[in-house]
Image (cartoon, grey):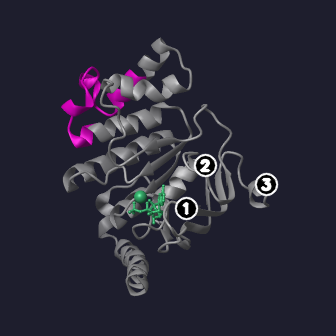
Amino acid sequence: MHATPSVAPVDAVVAEDVSKVFFSGTDPVWALEDFSLSLEPGSFTCIVGPSGCGKSTFLRILGGLEERTVGSVTMPEASSPIPAAFVFQEHGVFPWMTVLENVAFGLRMSGTGKTERLGIARDWLERVRLADFADSYPHQLSGGMRQRVAIARAFATGSSVLLMDEPLGALDAQTRMLMQEELIALWEAERKTVLMVTHDIDEAIILSDRVIVMSGRPGTLREDITVPFDRPRSFDIERDPAYSALRARIWELLREDARTAEETA
Ligand SMILES: Nc1ncnc2c1ncn2[C@@H]1O[C@H](COP(=O)(O)OP(=O)(O)OP(=O)(O)O)[C@@H](O)[C@H]1O
Ligand SMILES: [Mg+2]
């Protein structure tokens, strides 16, 4: 055991000195190096970083989908048998299940009885305005609606930690802004611990308490930035001069890394 978990709240997410090497081709690939991050319970954190810096790998390690090579990970005492619920960019819903079955799926995995899980799933479909589509199949929905199904499923699991990997990345700009508003509202009501990867700096600032900027591969922590805007938030913060300053700072950090990656390629 390292020192940090003893001072962190028991329901915090703590990753310490996590490194990951993949041995798939001829040369090993260091995806992450000594990456440490603690998440306060009920906080919303976004990770931004150059493509290939290990963001998805880190989320997968936290959620138990990938083994770490070195380091330690502490997840909250499970309030649900699922340590963390995932939302992916696409293909996160099962095409052979109805919308209702998809939302109930996580609860099925955690052993919740059928009547109870369908009841919870129906409540969540109401909350994401998809009650009329309970018996539809994913291919009958728009991309935005499918992501609402994936988000409802993640919230419905009862897990206190949500790991989202570019959940709005495949949506058009307008749908994306609407979904950002919905996501803020759901999170403000539920206060789960959210860690979300995004390539969109504005999205990171609008949604999060903290923005973690990662360096290029192997991914390390470059900067841990506190977002200073009050909640509840709206897109009005974009008119605040502090918003432009923060945006420019994050962009500058990312740009340096993109340049370095290009020069050392
Ligand atoms: N299963 C795997 N086998 C081998 N290499 C892998 C595997 N998964 C990821 N990698 C490599 O590890 C590095 C980090 O990948 P990862 O997908 O975590 O990056 P990312 O930051 O999520 O990138 P993006 O922004 O493009 O989604 C990349 O070089 C990738 O090629
Ligand atoms: Mg990724």
Earlier sequence position, callout 1 versus callout 3? 3
Q: Between residue 75 and residue 42, name the one nearer to us.
A: 75
Would residue 226 be seen by someone viewing this image from the given angle?
no
**Disc nearer the start of the sequence (3/2):** 3
Crowd band around label 1 with a 10 angstrom C-alpha radius: few (<14), some (14–19), many (20+): few
Mark 1 vs ligand 1: CB under 8 Å? Answer: yes
Which of the marked residues, 2 or 1, is nearer the chain's N terminus? 1
Which of pointers 2 and 1 indicates the residue nearer the eye?
1
The answer to whether residue 171 of the structure is visible from this angle is yes
Q: Which residue in the protein does label 2 denote?
A: 41
Residue 207, how many percent across, how many down? Answer: 41, 56
| Marks 2 and 1 in Cβ contact (< 8 Å) | no
Which is closer to the viewer, label 3 or label 2?
Answer: 3
Q: Callout 2: few (<14), some (14-19), or many (20+) C-alpha neighbours within 10 Å?
A: some
Image x and y of residue 171, in percent = 24, 51
Classify residue 154 as left or right of residue 127: right
Q: Residue under circle 1? A: 23
* x 59%, y 62%: residue: 20
Res 173 → quadrant: bottom left
How far apart in space, not on screen, are marks 1 and 3 (Cα)? 34 Å
Query: Would you say residue 141 sits in the magenta stretch?
Result: yes
Label 3, label 2: how many angstroms apart (C-alpha)?
15 Å
Residue furthest bottom as drawn: 263
Q: Nearer the viewer, residue 237 or 171?
A: 171
Tell me: 23 left or right of 208. right
Labelled pair 1, 3 in contact (Cβ < 8 Å): no
Q: x and y percent of residue 261 in the render?
A: 42, 80
Q: Secondary structure at mark 3?
A: helix
